Amino acid sequence: MKQYLGQTLLRTLMLTTLSVATLTLTACSESETAVAPEAAGPAYNTTLNMVDFMNLVLEPTADVLWESAGWVNSIESGYVELYPTTDEEWENVRRHSAMIIELGNALALPGRAVDNDAWVTYANGLSNAGILAMNAAAEQNQEDFFQAGAQLYSVCTACHQGYNAAVSRFASN
Ligand code: HEC
């Protein structure tokens, strides 16, 4: 272990003297170095700001779940069930549920998490809702899937309220 740490430090020293391009290449090929917390530079890429993270990553993923749960009743189309009807459609929502689990982790990353307290609780809540949705999708259980979607929604809302995020779509809840 000592030897490993020593090697890492040496490598870090060497890396800092290299050009940026070389450093990027080396970091990609040396996964050991990337994982070590002492390694040069941040271990995570948190370039994406919160607004982009929400609009471009989290919401489109959550929308796939919400648009697959419950029903709509309109004059034009009548009563329409939104639930998946084929194995492929269920697999698609299962896939997006898995993404929600990991997006909870992405929100909790050092450098992205706003604090180490309630923020992380909400981020974990997102992952937990994702697990429920994933299980329900695997069982093709409509009722459980609906409940998971509702839980997901309440986590979004709770975090937005807790952090005074101006999100009109979630404001009335
Ligand atoms: C851990 C906390 C947290 C969770 C969980 C969370 N959000 Fe957010 N969200 C924020 C914060 C903070 C902002 C405000 C960002 C800003 O304006 O800088 C935000 C903003 C947004 C916005 C508005 C972005 C804009 O254009 O201003 C949308 C849309 C959004 N969130 C969607 C969601 C959805 C959908 C979920 C759940 C699937 C969710 N968020 C869960 C913290 C969270």
Image: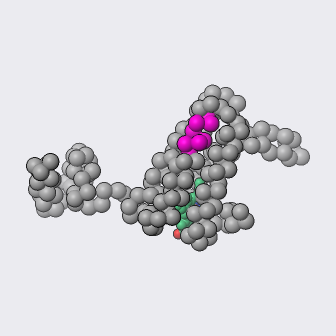
Please tell me which residue lies in front, 61 or 1.
1
Residue at image position (64%, 51%) is 151
In the image as oriented, which residue stretches furthest toward the top? Answer: 87
| Quadrant position of residue 59 | bottom right
- Name the magenta segment's main secondary structure: helix
Query: What x and y, as percent, mark residue 53?
Result: 50, 59
Residue 132 is a magenta residue: yes
**Residue 9 visible (yes or no):** yes
| Quadrant position of residue 161 | bottom right
In the image, is residue 84 above or below residue 148? above
In the image, is residue 134 above or below residue 24? above
Q: Is residue 65 left or right of residue 27?
A: right
Residue at image position (61%, 62%) is 158
Residue at image position (77%, 38%) is 81
Residue 164 is a magenta residue: no
Q: Is residue 153 left or right of residue 121?
A: right
Number of numbered discs visible in the structure rendering:
0
Q: Is residue 29 left or right of residue 64?
A: left
**Residue 21 visible (yes or no):** no
Tell me which image quadrant ligand 1 sits in: bottom right
- Residue range highlighted in magenta: 130-137
Colour style of the rendered protein structure: one colour
Query: What x and y, as percent, mark residue 114?
Result: 46, 67
Residue at image position (89%, 46%) is 75
In the image, is residue 170 above or below residue 65? below
| Quadrant position of residue 24 | bottom left
Please tell me which residue lies in front, 59 or 170.
170
Viewport quadrant of the C terminus: bottom right
